[in-house]
């Protein structure tokens, strides 16, 4: 183990679009080159991962391949199927699914898509898409290429179940998001190159030297206000830039507001700077603290009531924000349940349309405005779970316009006095970014956007 | 300003001799940085064991002579014949290329074992080596020094090796086994945090001569018995996170003044020892002094802090939820004591505005428990 | 941890006595368990110092290694202990029922150790013994590798949730009782027993203080107290060594007797306490589903027995890629099933889930027992709906599938809607299974208004994952050209090198 991570300085990028095109060309070239069994693409948040997947699938089809696509959740599969079928109406796309699956309306309306329970149902399809779990039930079929989406979220043992279905793989994913996990507490596999609890990409790379690893250099999602902070906090050894300039994205209120000054002040801060820290009074609370969760819901409600128009490269003339453009992200499932209840309590008719979910489930999703309940808010102690860099990374990198963090005062002290007692193992490289450091970077940024409630 | 803080710290310690930080006490900094008492006792160089013993809560960190003998014998064996076994491990197990080997014993300077002299000699030898002048590759027991809060701490790594990858590496020789490439993670952690203090001290030494910190690797080499044998084997330990963490804790010590400012003027942990070093200060008075300082007790302290039994008895006396540990405590938000929890659960106490929600959850839980016990579940 | 379990600990701390956390004991407790109290020497890797072993309180055998650093004495000890343990294990390989694939022993061994450290000590011993060769240089008796393999099997199996073939008694006790101290202190058997059942003449406080005083309560191992090591053990071992060097048989016998007596003094209090804990645990009724889980233990025991009988190889040092993935899947399934079993069986555990909003208990306020729907296949099936009113803080969402311990097995329901109003929640359910095959639900399968009923989420059925064949590790999980770095039998099977033994 030689662990000194080399930091490759990035050449200054004059034009994000050109850099992104160049990266895609290089990836496709490596795929076309017959020497590589796998090609890995690391993608920071919103760097056009799905675009790449669609593009690569189309190129493979053109080359006479019949690729399969492996995603991690049914939602991801549906989204990919819809994009593929819409962008390439000439390609027959197959959606392999379990019994009891109900295709969403958008998918049902497509003419070049077939839904099937078995491969036999999809015999005429040029591209077949399914979840990893579904692919794990398929036997006795081998395809030339598989595209594995969100591959860093797929555990090594899952990869082992599907690897015999393909000869070559394009592994695409975001290494900065949450690692897969297991509820089983055992140290038995620590240090093994094939530790089944690790993500599949790392395990594959451990066993296969000289696999080309590419990186998408531009985040098309994150606004220019967010990309540098997210890059610094969560991708310290790589770099990426925002694809849009400082003036491309903007939020404006549709109505004036004075009723709830603290909420309004936070919204103004977020609208003008892209970030806001809505800080509640210092208090130790259980994670189900109503005040914190209700505040997150109220901020979303207030945003809906006042109405906002979002301007961006897709809508240069502005577009009114809808409930579905807003998400509230939390750490725990019970918090998500309680925030949903709190949204209902606001009495605002469209409030229940706001997406509320845990970091795990928000992975890969995108919204205009995201309200985050800080995982460390109100806690006495920071556990490894609450400090995990990937968790905060997911929560703080889902937005195109603005991110509002709701927290109780005291996180700075919590981090300052945090005991570092994580176990240390032989021959296991330390995982970076370090959760503590990443939290510090984020907190330093948020401190500049603090609104005391 | 600095002087006043030092004076205050000296007054806290009283007449006893100042105990300096060592690798072990530095490593302990990471365990509970929130504890004011621990920070004050460490910064003032007070004798925690003597204090805890005098107030009736002696620590129980005895070390078995078997472990000590075994540790010494193993280290000696690894270093025998100019570190022949060590070289075998570095070359065969860790696949390192060590071109030429020069062994330098820094255990004493011509028979002089004093820390200061040894440190000066170490500095001279290591700087020469860093500049590529000496022919030393393995440095046995160098004496490093670190300034912590204005006080010198001498630190003595088992071994420093140069030219592993062209950089200095700390080599830790431990007698706990590496069985099938795995070792006890608590012990590995303890060894690593100690090694981090050496890394920081060595970087400091070189840094004073204008040599960058890259010269010292933050990967340590751990040498330990293989499986159930006496044969050494080795492994790398990536210590980057621990180096960063310890660096943070060291910078916190510099802020000790903030804590001292909050203390009552007359506070002291002086044992007022007599000529035979027996404490003359009444134990009750010392206890009172300790009781005036904030502690952050965690059950985990029992594993590493000399004051832990005192703090636990204090937490018990206060009916503090700290006694039960963070996992239980987390469930009760801002509530601190069992009295408060039970009072709210039984509806005997009126919750403050902060507590309304917690009180409702507690009453529900209490109702559930009553239901269970009513049905005859309780033994 | 839920608020309810946390409250139990607070209650214990306030009342200064242990509080039950469960209604039942969820682990099988054999009528004839084998207790092993292992002691190891400080600072030495897997150097056994002594063990007390036996299947009844009155007939414990004390085995002592006079000089734990001596290799021959170590393996002589392993052989002695191995013979006792193998006799015990073999006594369960008698009664076998069923035919072919389904044939299995009706009972399985159960080894109990004082604490988790005891399991670790057996794991080390198993690792030390299982690769040893029985011929050539450093040969050991036949029983040593056999014993090593069995220990490894038991230790591996103990990692799986809900199993009972090897358990630390501290774990069994803390599963059932909450104390007013921390998890760390609960791992000290004497401290734990101080809360649950203090010696009759002592208060809990006094018993707790004694538990941490090595002169009153010697540690339950595997480490002995440093004071004992330095004050008593080290001089006694030195006397033994001297006598051996001098070849003086009288002095040697005297030194050995002294050592045995010293160690007996350290080990016997723990031995008695383990048996006391066992009889306490016997007084707790066994949970209904424990027997079914224990059948899994019997099957694993039978399979491993047969594997040994067929001359199978010792377990590898580390899992292969496919072995690791298989094991992970098994451990995850077992944990999910154990948790669900416990909540299903045990009102206390269910209440825990209720206080966390993951289950509920309430009264049926409305029922449509006659409701039917027509399926895709044009079949009319009963789909009764009921509404349950509960004061539990339910967080379950619509479409969650549920099971109920209050109704006959097989009952299944799905949440249709959840309506909360302050502290009261009304949950409407559609019953989807467990009503029999007819068009009308069988009597007693649909809850009636006024009936008290509990529901919890259905853990569901998970298919066992399918991996490539063991000898066909795919390219993603094996390095090209590297043909198995960890062979089934390691290179040092004959004898691990011992370096310069002292």
Image: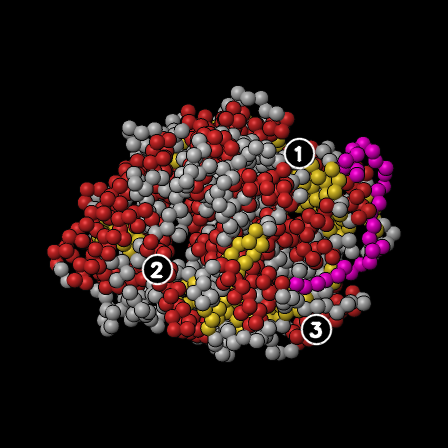
* Image x and y of residue B229, in percent: 34, 65
Quadrant occupied by the C terminus of chain B: top left
The answer for how far apart the CA atoms under marks 1 and 2 are is: 58 Å
Chain to which mark 1 belongs? A
Q: Where is mark 1, residue-wise?
A: A291
Chain to which mark 3 belongs? A
**Range covered by the magenta-colored residues:** A237-265
Which residue is found at the position 51% from the left and 39% from the top?
A: B14
Q: Is residue C310 left or right of residue A448?
A: left
Which residue is found at the position 72% from the left and 33% from the top?
A: A346
- Residue B45, above or below C152: above
Residue furthest out toward the right = A317
Q: Where is mark 2, residue-wise?
A: B70
The answer for how far apart the CA atoms under marks 3 and 2 are is: 58 Å
Q: Label 2 neighbourhood size at 10 Å, few (<14), some (14-19), many (20+)?
A: some
Which residue is found at the position 59% from the left and 47% from the top?
A: B253
């Amino acid at each position: 183990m030689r662990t000194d991570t080399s930091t490759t300085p990035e050449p200054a990028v004059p034009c994000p679009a050109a850099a992104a095109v160049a990266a895609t060309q290089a990836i496709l070239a490596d795929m076309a080159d017959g020497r590589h069994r796998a090609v890995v693409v690391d993608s920071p948040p919103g760097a056009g991962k799905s675009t790449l997947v669609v593009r690569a699938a189309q190129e493979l089809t053109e080359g006479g391949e019949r690729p399969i696509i492996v995603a991690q959740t049914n939602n991801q599969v549906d989204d990919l199927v819809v994009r593929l079928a819409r962008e390439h109406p000439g390609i027959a796309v197959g959606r392999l699914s379990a019994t009891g699956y109900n295709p969403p309306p958008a998918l049902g309306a497509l003419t070049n898509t077939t839904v099937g329970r078995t491969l036999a149902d999809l015999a005429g399809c040029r591209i077949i898409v399914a979840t990893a779990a579904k692919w794990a039930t398929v036997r006795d079929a081998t395809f030339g290429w598989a595209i594995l989406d969100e591959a860093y979220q797929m555990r090594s043992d899952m990869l082992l179940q599907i690897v015999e279905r393909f000869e070559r793989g394009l592994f695409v994913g975001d290494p900065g998001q949450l690692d897969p996990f297991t509820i089983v507490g055992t140290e038995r596999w620590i240090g093994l190159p094939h530790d089944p609890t690790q993500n599949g990409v790392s395990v594959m790379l451990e066993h296969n030297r000289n696999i080309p690893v590419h990186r998408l250099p531009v985040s098309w999602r994150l606004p220019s206000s967010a990309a540098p902070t997210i890059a610094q906090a969560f991708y310290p050894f790589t770099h990426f830039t925002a694809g849009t300039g400082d003036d491309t994205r903007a939020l404006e209120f549709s109505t004036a507001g004075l009723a709830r000054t603290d909420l309004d002040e936070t919204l103004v801060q977020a609208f003008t700077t892209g970030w806001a820290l809505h800080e509640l009074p210092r208090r130790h609370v259980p994670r189900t603290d109503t005040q914190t969760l209700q505040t997150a819901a109220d901020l979303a409600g207030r945003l809906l009531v006042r109405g906002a128009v979002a301007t961006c490269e897709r809508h240069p003339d502005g577009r009114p924000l809808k409930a579905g453009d807003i998400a509230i992200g939390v750490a725990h499932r019970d918090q998500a349940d309680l925030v949903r209840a709190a949204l209902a309590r606001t009495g605002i008719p469209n409030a229940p349309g706001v997406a509320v979910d845990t970091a795990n489930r928000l992975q890969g999703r995108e919204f205009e405005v995201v309200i985050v309940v800080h995982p460390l808010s109100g806690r006495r102690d920071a556990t490894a779970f609450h400090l995990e860099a990937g968790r905060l990374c997911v929560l703080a990198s889902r937005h195109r316009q603005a991110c509002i963090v709701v927290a109780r005062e005291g996180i700075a002290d919590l981090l300052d006095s945090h005991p570092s007692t994580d176990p240390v193992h032989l021959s296991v490289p330390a995982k970076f970014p370090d959760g503590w450091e990443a939290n510090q970077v984020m907190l330093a940024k948020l401190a500049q956007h603090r609104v005391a409630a | 300003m600095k002087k006043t803080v030092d004076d205050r710290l000296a007054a806290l310690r009283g007449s006893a001799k100042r105990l300096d930080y060592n690798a072990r006490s530095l490593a302990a900094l990471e365990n509970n940085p929130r504890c004011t008492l621990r920070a004050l006792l460490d910064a003032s160089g007070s004798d925690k064991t003597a204090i805890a013993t005098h107030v009736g809560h002696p620590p129980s960190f005895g070390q078995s002579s078997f472990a000590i003998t075994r540790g010494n014998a193993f280290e000696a064996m690894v270093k025998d014949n100019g570190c022949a076994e060590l070289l075998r491990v570095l070359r065969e197990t860790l696949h390192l290329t060590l071109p030429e080997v020069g062994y330098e014993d820094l255990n004493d300077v011509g028979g002089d074992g004093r820390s200061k002299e040894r440190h000066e000699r170490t500095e001279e030898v290591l700087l020469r080596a860093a500049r590529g002048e000496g022919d030393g590759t393995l440095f046995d027991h160098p004496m490093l020094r670190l300034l912590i809060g204005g006080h010198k701490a001498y630190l003595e790594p088992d071994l420093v090796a140069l030219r592993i990858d062209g950089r200095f590496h700390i080599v830790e020789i431990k007698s706990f086994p590496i069985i099938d490439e795995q070792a006890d993670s608590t012990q590995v952690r303890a060894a690593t945090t100690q090694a981090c203090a050496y890394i920081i001290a060595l970087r400091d030494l070189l840094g004073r001569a204008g040599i960058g910190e890259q010269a010292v690797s933050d990967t340590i080499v751990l040498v330990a018995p293989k499986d159930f044998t006496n044969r050494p084997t080795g492994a790398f330990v990536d210590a980057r996170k621990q180096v960063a963490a310890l660096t943070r804790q060291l910078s916190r010590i510099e802020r000790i003044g903030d804590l001292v400012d909050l203390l009552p003027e007359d506070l002291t942990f002086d044992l007022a020892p007599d000529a035979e070093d027996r404490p003359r200060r009444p134990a009750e008075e010392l206890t009172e002094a300790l009781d005036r300082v904030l502690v952050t007790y965690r059950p985990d302290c029992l594993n590493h802090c000399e004051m832990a039994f005192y703090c636990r008895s204090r937490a018990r006396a206060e009916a503090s939820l700290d006694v039960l540990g963070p996992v239980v405590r987390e469930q009760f938000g801002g509530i601190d004591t069992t009295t408060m929890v039970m009072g709210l659960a039984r509806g005997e106490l009126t919750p403050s505005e902060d507590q309304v929600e917690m009180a409702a959850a507690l009453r529900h839980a209490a109702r559930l428990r009553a239901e269970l016990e009513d049905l005859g579940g309780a033994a | 941890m839920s608020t309810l379990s946390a409250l139990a600990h607070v209650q214990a701390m306030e009342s200064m006595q242990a509080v039950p956390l469960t209604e039942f004991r969820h682990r099988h407790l054999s009528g004839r368990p084998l207790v092993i109290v292992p002691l190891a020497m400080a600072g030495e890797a897997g150097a056994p110092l002594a063990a007390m072993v036996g299947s009844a309180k009155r007939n414990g055998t004390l085995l002592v290694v006079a000089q734990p650093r001596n290799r021959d004495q170590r393996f002589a000890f392993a052989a002695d202990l191995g013979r006792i343990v193998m006799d015990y294990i073999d006594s369960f390989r008698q009664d076998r029922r069923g035919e072919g694939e389904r044939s299995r022993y009706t009972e399985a061994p159960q080894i109990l150790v004082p604490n988790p450290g005891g399991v670790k000590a057996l794991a080390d011993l198993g690792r030390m013994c299982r690769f040893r060769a029985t011929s050539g240089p450093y040969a050991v008796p036949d029983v040593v590798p056999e014993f090593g393999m069995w220990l490894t099997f038991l230790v591996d199996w103990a990692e799986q949730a809900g199993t009972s073939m090897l358990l630390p008694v501290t774990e069994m006790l803390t599963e059932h009782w909450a104390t007013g101290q921390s998890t760390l202190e609960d791992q000290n058997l004497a401290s734990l027993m101080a809360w649950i059942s203090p010696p009759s003449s002592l208060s809990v406080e006094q018993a707790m203080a004694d538990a941490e005083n090595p002169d009153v309560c010697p540690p339950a191992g595997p480490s002995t107290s440093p004071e004992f090591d330095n004050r008593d053990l080290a001089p006694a071992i030195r006397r033994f060594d001297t006598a051996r060097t001098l070849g003086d048989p009288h002095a040697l016998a005297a030194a050995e007797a002294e050592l045995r007596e010293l160690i007996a003094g350290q080990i016997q209090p723990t031995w008695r306490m383990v048996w006391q804990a066992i009889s306490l645990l016997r007084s707790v009724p066994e949970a209904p589903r424990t027997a079914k889980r224990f059948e899994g233990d019997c099957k694993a025991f039978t399979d491993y027995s047969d594997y040994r009988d067929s001359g199978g190889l010792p377990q590898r040092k580390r899992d292969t890629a496919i072995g690791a993935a298989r094991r992970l899947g098994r451990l995850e399934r077992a944990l999910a099933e154990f948790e669900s079993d416990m909540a299903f069986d045990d009102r206390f555990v269910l209440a825990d889930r209720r206080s966390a909003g993951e289950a509920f208990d309430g009264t049926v306020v409305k029922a449509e027992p006659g409701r039917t729907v027509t399926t895709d296949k044009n079949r009319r099936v009963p789909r009764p709906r009921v509404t349950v009113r509960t004061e539990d803080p339910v967080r379950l969402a619509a479409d969650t599938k549920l099971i109920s311990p209050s109704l006959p097995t097989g009952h299944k329901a799905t949440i249709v809607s959840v309506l909360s109003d302050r502290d009261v929640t009304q949950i409407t359910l559609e019953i989807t299974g467990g009503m029999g095959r007819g068009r009308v639900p069988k009597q007693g399968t649909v809850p009636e208004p006024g009936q008290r009923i509990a529901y919890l989420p259905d853990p569901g059925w998970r298919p066992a994952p399918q991996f490539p064949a063991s000898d066909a590790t795919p390219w993603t999980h094996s390095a090209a050209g590297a043909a198995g770095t960890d062979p089934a039998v390691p290179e040092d099977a004959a004898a691990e090198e011992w370096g310069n033994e002292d």
